[in-house]
Image: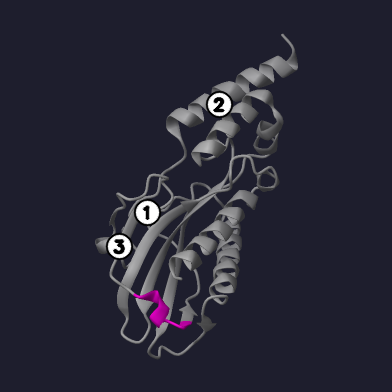
Amino acid sequence: MTTRTISFQILTAAALLLAACGSAEPVAYTDIASSPQLLPNMDDSSGRMPYRYTTTVDWRTYSRVIVDPVAIYRGRDNQFGDMSESDRAVLAGYMQAQFTEKLRRRFQLAVDPVPNTLRVRLTLTGAATTTPVLGPLSRFDLAGGVYNGVQSVRGGEGTFTGSVVYAVELYDASTNRLLGAYVSKQYPNSLNIGASFGALAAAKTGLEKGADALVAQLR
């Protein structure tokens, strides 16, 4: 039996294990302010927004936005695993930059809570890193390639790939009324080879997708 054949078998077994178990799923985190309002999102079949709170809002009435500094979640139900504090800080900084940059394309950035201003509170609640070597290898290996191809069609996670989980809370800045909130899990397309290189690349790609999704929601 060749080394490559053994590699195929290992990756196949790992892919099947991932398909059966999956990575950690988000929860309605107990230590965020909107936790009591969050409910299972029955309209979401993708698993990317499993919890949500909504009200009737005409987002077009908001022309300005205050983006609060990203908070790193410290609750016992966080989903960082053994991720280092430095990596958590890197992701929080990247999240701040991405969401601010993309929100400013829709709103004027503001600091004063005057009428018609939206306040966005972001909490990084969990993340997983991409497995070195196996992350990119599984995009080229036959067994991993087949599995990732299927996951790409389903919109599911790829093998040995990182992800990010976070909470978004939307307030009317002038009244501090909660307008909406949700928990989201984001990750790259399973065939995104570039996002498989680097421990935090996949989580960063997830944050980029998450920022785009929020802006689309607020149009």
Who comes first in sequence, dot 2 or dot 1?
Answer: 2
Q: Which mark is residue 151?
A: none
Locate residue 90, reporting x and y percent: 61, 62
- Alpha-carbon span between mark 3 and mark 1: 22 Å
Disc number lying in front (3 or 2): 3
- Residue at the spot of label 2: 14
- In the rendered image of this protein, does residue 207 appear above or below residue 60? above
The kind of residue tagged 2 is Ala
| Picture quadrant of residue 209 | bottom right
Relative side of 77 to 4, left or right: left
- Residue at the spot of label 1: 76
Decide if residue 71 is in sight here: no
Q: Secondary structure at mark 3?
A: strand
- Badge 2: residue crowd in 10 Å (few <14, some 14–19, many ≥20): some
Residues in magenta, as a range = 58-64
- In the rendered image of this protein, does residue 23 appear above or below residue 12? below
Picture mark count:
3
- Alpha-carbon span between mark 2 and mark 1: 29 Å
Relative side of 139 to 75, left or right: right
